[in-house]
Image (cartoon, helix red, strand yellow):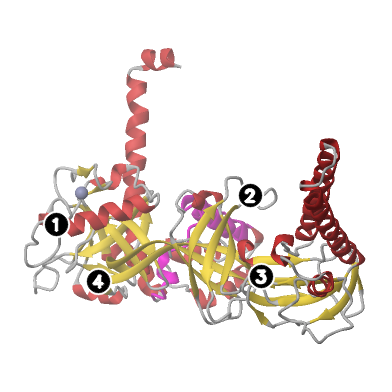
Amino acid sequence: MSSSSSNISIAPVSAPAETAGHEHHSPEQQGWLRAVVGSVPMLLTFAALAGVAYWGHHTEWKFSSAQHIGVKSSTAEKVEELLTTETGTSSPAKWCEKHGIAACPLCDRSLAQVSKPLESASAEELERVQKAFAVRDRHENGPHYLANGLRVRAASKEAVEKLGIDVAPVWEAAMTESISASGEVSFDATRVARLAARVPGTAWRVTKQIGDPVNAGDLLAIIDAAEVGKAKSELLQALVQTRLKTQALGNLKNAPVPERQKKEAEAARRDAEVRLLSAEQALVNLGLTVKATEFGKLEVDDIANQLQRLGLSRELSKTDADLPGTLLPLRAPLDGVVMQVDVIAGEVVDPEDVLFVVADPHQMWVNLNVMATDANWVHVGQAVRFRPDGVKAEFTGQVDWIGTSADETTRTIPVRVVMPNADGKLRASALGVGRIVLREEPHAITVPNEAVQTVGGCQVVFVRDKEFLKPNGPKVFHARMVRTGAKDITNTEIIVGVAIGEVVVSKGSALLADELKRSQSVSVANHRQSERRTPIATNGQETKKE
Ligand SMILES: [Zn+2]
């Protein structure tokens, strides 16, 4: 919002004093109104109110900027006397199609209000402008009736001081343009695991607790499950059967027996092998890898011993004789931290219960909710700075994914950001605000925020005439159309419209804008009137058009 925005609630009260030019002023205005209402006949009151209404209607209830910027009201009354709008040149300024402004100082360097003529714009500068326009949509200036080189003349140097007009140089500064969006931190879904037991059983031992760091493969718990014992004994049986059948076949090989008997023996061996394979597979399905061939010529007792500690040979010692053969390890599938433990030793567990959540907090996701209108300017790979609520530190990451549909209730577009989090300070479920960086411009041309005004749909600044400071120099401020880019709490980037070395009005620019509006409303009104008059002259054609 420009600082010239109206304040309707006080406007009617201050109105009569201002329009009439009487010496009634703001601090006593309310009292004044009350006094009028209380002490004079009703008729007069109505007259006063009618006056207020007339003024309000006439000025569209706009409140003068003079009061806003703290100019004493005695001065405010005289603003119109101290400032006048004039047309700078006889011919309208050239409209720059490329940059969307009139009187473009980038294309026509002679327009710049600087003492030393400027060299033509460098390739870098033209590239900077192009980049700034490409990054997102910009305010379009229009209508173009401001295009004819308007300027505001102050009555004198003293008038400028009296009005409290301040100036500031056009300055080069680093600016960052970004889109803000609220969001929530979550674990990277590709780096989080929710673990349950594969079969029903009881928790035999729990070896990790919340907060424990784990590597992929670390033991979290041991489940005692009957199904595991069954699968192991099936494997052992199948193994023994296979050995027996293989031996029987060997014995028959050179024996004088019918061929049919040999074939039967071979089929029996193959049957046993199939059973062995399926017993192996049953254990693999439980997460226990075993290869019967690797047992070689080991005694059955030794094999049984090995099977007892299957999958747990690292953790359970050989001397642990009384181990049940029904144990199943539950291991971390990834490097990370144990975030959740929902099991205690001895507890009955079921495959539907999540017993552990292991997540890698070294990389997190921030899920931002971006306004649909902003989402067009977001791209994968753009840098994002995220600040969780109540935290001073800012975290940086990159846009990783942009949603293809809007959220049903908020109508925002989900944007996922991947954030490295080496120190683990970014915590899941934290809320905060992220800034998606569209552009970082180390050499932005900037003016103070208060320098930029909007007049008739155009963004303007007031550039001090280059001769202003000379003793008899013109006390003139040129209304310069501009196009703005990034904005922070103090500065506004001017993509095009001013040049380094120029001086713009900062404090008090709203006064100049008001003066411009005043003169424009007169000229526009005149323009409209003449438009209206023209058809009357050709009355017949006008009615036909309808
Ligand atoms: Zn231009």
Mark 1 or mark 4, whichever is nearer to me? 1
Which residue does the image show at 84% across and 45% down from the upper left?
265
Residue 452: where, in percent of width, then height?
A: 34, 62
User: Which is more toward the observer, 137 or 230?
Assistant: 230
User: Which is more toward the observer, 35 or 95?
Assistant: 95
Is the residue 339 above or below the residue 523 in the image?
below
Query: Mark 2 sits on what residue?
Result: 411
Q: Amino acid at mark 1?
A: Ala
Range of magenta residues: 43-71
Q: Marks 1 and 4: CB-CB under 8 Å? A: no
SS at badge 4? strand
Between the residue at mark 2 and the residue at mark 3, the CA separation in whole angstroms equals: 54 Å
* Marker disc for residue 171: 4
Magenta span has 536?
Answer: no
Q: Visible in this render: residue 440? A: yes
Q: Which quadrant holds residue 294?
A: bottom right
Q: Amino acid at mark 2?
A: Arg
Query: Mark 1 sits on what residue?
Result: 121
Query: Mark 3 sits on what residue?
Result: 38
Which residue does the image show at 44% across and 71% down from the upper left?
67
Tally of numbered tags: 4
SS at badge 2? loop
Which mark sits nearer the N-terminus, 1 or 3?
A: 3
Mark 1 or mark 3, whichever is nearer to me? 1
Structural crowding at the residue carrying mark 2, measured as other residues with C-alpha within 10 Å and reported as few (<14), some (14–19) or many (≥20): few
Which residue does the image show at 58% across and 72% down from the upper left?
30
Q: Marks 2 and 1: CB-CB under 8 Å? A: no
Residue 91: where, in percent of width, then height?
A: 15, 42
